[in-house]
Amino acid sequence: MKVPVRYGRTHIEVEVPDENLLAVCHLHPVPPLSDPQGAIEEALDNPIGTPPIRELARGRENACIVVCDKTRPVPNSLILPPLLRRLEEAGIDRNRITILIATGTHRPNLGDELVEMLGEFVVENYRIENHIATDLESHADLGKTNTGMPILLDKRYVESDLKIVVGLIEPHLMAGYSGGRKILCPGIIAMPCMRVFHGAEFMGHPKAVTGVLDGNPVHLTAMEVADKAGCDFAVHVTLDEQRRITGVFAGDVHETFFAGVRLVDKVAKVPIPEPADIVITSSAGYPLDTTFYQAIKGLVGVLPILKPGSTVILAASLSEGLGLPRFREIYTEFQTWDEFKRLIFSPDYFREDQWMVQEQMKVAEVADIWVYSDGVPAEELELAKVKPLTSLQEGLDQALKKHGPNAKIVVVPDGPYVMPVISDTPTTS
C-alpha cells in the first residue's frame, strides 16, 4: 500500500507491505465549517463566558492581541480582520492596537513570514511586534507561581487595557494541548522562567505528555500564569488535516480552551490494537518540520505506540536546519543519552532549548530514531544522535530487514496532530 506522508509543503509516498501494515493513523473525519468566516463573526458576537468583544472594547484605551508564531498554522488572516474591525468600531484607535507575536523562545518572525502568518491587510495596517524572551527589561514581574517559578510577562500585554489571545488547539507534547493559557506561557514569558517551566523536572514529569491535562505541571503552571496576568477575550480554532477550520471558540480564555480540547480529543485520538515494531511519521510538514527542534514533536507524538527496541522513521524537510545555534550546541556537549540525563539533572546545568533534546531522549530510550531529510547534511543528523537516511523508502526497507518479515508497521502521516494510542478496540481510521 502506498501511503503519503507530509513533508515540507508537499508529501512523500512510501510503499508499505500490506501484510505488515497494522494501521494508518489519520484524524477522525470531522466536516470543516461550510462558512468559516461567518462562524468567526458569530463567535465574536456570541462568545462563551464573556460579553461580545464590542462590549468589552468600549471605553478601553488600547488593546494587545497575542498571536502564535509561524510554528502554528493559525488562520489569522480570517480571524484578525473581523476582530480588529470590532475593536475599532468600539472606539479603540488603530494606532493603539498592538499585535504581539508569542515567539516563546523561538526566533522573531519578520518580513514575508508576517504576511503569510497574518495576511497582507493586517501587516500593512497594524503595529506588529515580536516577543523577545531574552530582553528582560521588556517584562513585568508578576510574582511567583506555587511551584516557585518567576512570572515575568511581556509588558506590552500586561500593561494593555484590553488583553486578547488568538490561537490553535492541537495536541501538544508537554502541555497536553496547545492554545489558551499556553499562548501566554511560554508564549510571552522571559527566559528565566524557562529554568522551571521547561526544566528537567517538569519535562520529565510522567504527566507532562500529549493529551494529558489532569496533574500535568506544564498545563497547571500555565493556567496559573494566565490567571495572574488576566485575559479579557480569546479566539481559538481547531483544524483538520487539510488545515480547514472545524471549530471556532471565542470568549473566556479557559472555557474556550476546554471546549476546543473536547473536540480535539474526539478527533485526534486514534486507537491501534498493539504496539508497533516500525513507526513512520512526520512533523506534519510545513511549518513544523522546518527545524529538527520542532520536528521532534513528530517523534514524541508516536511514543505511546512504540514497542521497546522498535524503530521510528521521521520524514522532515528541515529547511532551516537543526534549529538555532544554541540548540545545535547542546548536542556537542554529550555522547550518550545517559550522559545527557546526568547533565540536565545536575543543579548547575541549564541550556536554552535543552527541553526538546530531553523530549527526543524519551523516544531514544525506547526506539532507534532514523530521519529522512534533504534539508541538512547527514553529519548534522548524526550530531543530533539520529541515523540519517537517503530516502524514506530506504528507511522502511532497512527497518524491515532489522525487525523481520512479521514486523508490525504503523504510519502516522500527519505526525503530532494525531494521538495514536494502544487500545483493545481496532482502529477505524
Image: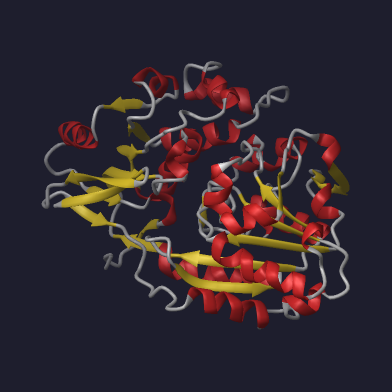
> Between 210 and 28, which is closer to the camera in this rendering?
28
Scheme of image coloration: secondary structure
For residue 47, say whether it is visible: no
Looking at the image, is 237 positioned above or below residue 173? Answer: below
Number of labels in the image equals 0
Q: Position of residue 14 (x, y in %)?
A: 20, 44
Q: Position of residue 66 (x, y in %)?
A: 70, 55
- Residue at 42 percent across and 61 percent down: it is 243
Q: Quadrant of the C terminus?
A: bottom left
- 191 or 311, which is in the foreground? 191
Question: Looking at the picture, does residue 391 appear above or below residue 44?
Answer: above
Query: On the picture, is 104 further left or further right than 293?
Result: right
Work out whether 322 lies above or below 173: above
Horizontal side of residue 282 vs 142, given as left or right: left
- Quadrant of the rendered image containing residue 107: top right
Residue 283, quarter of the rendered image: top left
- The x and y percentages for residue 242 are 37, 61
> Which of 62/25 is in front?
62
Task: Give the residue drawn at x 12%, y 47%.
Answer: 17
Residue displayed at 39% across by 20% down: 382
Q: Is residue 133 above or below residue 116?
A: above
From where the camera sits, is residue 158 visible? Answer: yes
